[in-house]
Amino acid sequence: MSFMQQVGILYNSELEEARDVAARLGESLSTLGVSSWQCPAWEEDKAKQQVTGSDLLLSVGGDGTMLHAAHISAPANVPILGVNLGKLGFITELSTDEAVSKLPSLLKGAGWVEERAMLEARLGGKSFYALNDVVVRSTVARLVNIKTEINGGMLAVYRADGVIVATATGSTGYSLAAGGPILHPQSKEIILQPISCHLGLNHTLVLPSQSVVDLKVMAGDKGILSIDGQVDIPIYSEQSTRVKLSTYVVHFLKTHQPKYFYSSLKRKLRGKEQS
C-alpha cells in the first residue's frame, strides 16, 4: 500500500517532451491508486494553491524547472523528486524511465530526503527566496559600485559587474562560472562572490550560515536584483538588499547514495548528459 496519497507534477511547458512525460507519470500514478495534479512550473502562484496536502512533487524538466519547484514546495514543506530532461541535471535525480520504474517503491517510502538551504533577499520591504543565488548586478555592460557589509561591518565597495550571494546548491551554478568554490549540497555556508571585479576585494568569501549580507548600489548607479536567474527586480541608487539564510529549506527526495554527488561531479562538470 502506498504511503503517499497525492502527488503534484510540475513540468516545463515549453518542452513537448516534458508535457508528454508529465502525462505518462500521471497515468502511472492513477494506476497505482494515487491522485495527482499537474501544473506548468513557471506558474508558481497557481501551483502554490494546489500544493497543500500533496505528499510529493515531481519536477519534469531540467535544473531550471527544479528551481521553480523549490520556490513552490519550500513554504509547504513538500519534498521534490527531479526527473531530468536537461543536460547537466545537477539537482535533478532520475531519467524518465527510472522515475516510472521506481515510482511504486518511492510511493511506499523508498529513498531518502536531502535538505538544502535557501536564501532570503529583502528589498524595499519585500522578501524573495532563492535556492541557487541572489545576484546584484549592473543593468548594462558597465561596472557598478556595490557597497558590501557583513553583519553590519564594512567589507568593501566592489567596482564590478556584480556580486553573487550563493548557497551550496548554487555553488555549481553562476558562482562556479565566476570562479567560486564547490560546496557539498547539504552545507549551510554562504558564498560571497564578486563578478569580474575591477576594484575591491577580488576574492571569494565563504561565510558562516548566520551571516547577514547587505549590498547597496552606490549613488549614481542603478542595478538589477536577480533571484535564481529567473526573477529580475530593478534596484535604484542607494537602495540596499539584505541577504541571509532563509528559514525555508528545500527537501529533495533522493534514490542515489549520498556519495553519488562526488562520483558524478566530474562527469557533470564536463557537460555530459546524466545517464
Image (tube, grey):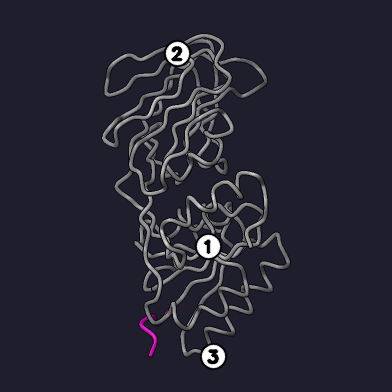
The residue identified by callout 1 is: 93
Q: Which residue is tagged 2?
A: 201
Image position of 197 with respect to 129: above or below: above
Residue receiving disc 3: 31
Q: Earlier in the sequence, mark 2 or mark 3?
A: 3
Q: Residues within 10 Å of mark 1 (few under 14, many from 20)?
A: many
State whether residue 144 is above or below residue 89. Answer: above
Q: Badge 2 local density, few (<14 within 10 Å), some, or many (20+)?
A: some
Front residue of this view, candidates 22 and 259? 259
149 sits to left or right of 216: left
Residue lying at the far right of the rendered structure: 16
Q: Residue sitting at 60 percent across and 49 percent down?
A: 268
Q: Secondary structure at mark 2?
A: loop
Q: Between marks 2 and 3, how big is the CA–CA gap?
A: 58 Å
Amino acid on which disc 2 is placed: Leu
Three-letter residue code for mark 1: Glu
Q: Measure the C-alpha gap from mark 2 to mark 1.
A: 37 Å
